[in-house]
Amino acid sequence: MNPEESYKSFSSQEIGAAIKKARRSKKISQKMLASMIDKAERTVQKYESGEIIAGIPVLKEIGNALDMPWFEIIGIMPKAIAGTQAENFEEKQYSFNSLGDIMNALLMICSHPEDLNFEISLNKPPQDSEWSASFTINGKGSGKYDADFCLFIENWMNHVKNKRSHEDHLQWQRDIIRYYSDSRLSTSEDMEN
């Protein structure tokens, strides 16, 4: 069972108690958490009491603020990293030996607009003073993982800003890859149905 399906078996009170426990374990006040996820303190209180159910998008925001995967907040361990698989988990290593390899990866990523909806822009002289190219993903866009991608970038920026040790950075990378390993891209069969 994937984390999203497991989530459905929890009551709002169980989810609230788990949020409270995770928040306290990080020594963060309700007021601080509210500020971190751009909500009112009373809203966080309602999540923790079970008065309002914290949906998966809210749990992802809370997880990002607490620097932990959302499913760990409520005690779910995805099958991909459960048990001995977690100890034997190794990141996929991609070989980038040329600029062509990087461009191939970008073309492959852009071939899944139903999952990640990129906008591509180019600025070049003489119309613009700078020559630059960029990819943009709207966090509220139509791609299935647009919001997740934006949360990842936010988490990455916060991680870089905190200037952690090399070992902490490698552990963070492993945790991020594990966290998103169950987020499958659409296949051609999915698009036909």
Image (cartoon, grey):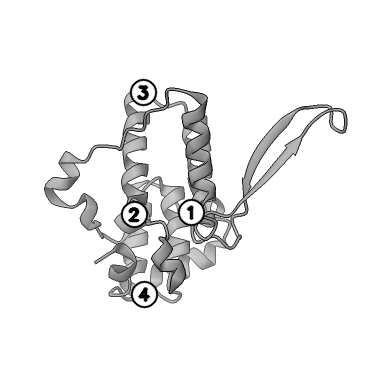
Q: Could you tell me the amino acid type at mark 3?
A: His
Q: Residues within 10 Å of mark 2 (few under 14, many from 20)?
A: some
Alpha-carbon distance for marks 2 and 1? 21 Å
Mark 3 — residue? 166
Q: Could you tell me the amino acid type at mark 4?
A: Ser
Nearer the observer: mark 2 or 1; the answer is: 1
When asked about the image quadrant of residue 95, the answer is: top left
Look at the picture and state if 28 lies above or below 14.
Answer: above
Mark 4 — residue? 12
Q: What residue is drawn where x is 36% and y is 36%?
A: 173
Mark identifier at residue 22: 2
Question: Looking at the image, how many numbered discs can be counted on the residues?
Answer: 4
Mark 1 — residue? 148
Tell me where residue 187 appears, x and y as whole percent.
40, 60
**C-beta proximity under 8 Å, tags 1 and 4:** no
Nearer the observer: mark 3 or 1; the answer is: 1
Q: Secondary structure at mark 2?
A: helix
Alpha-carbon distance for marks 2 and 3? 25 Å
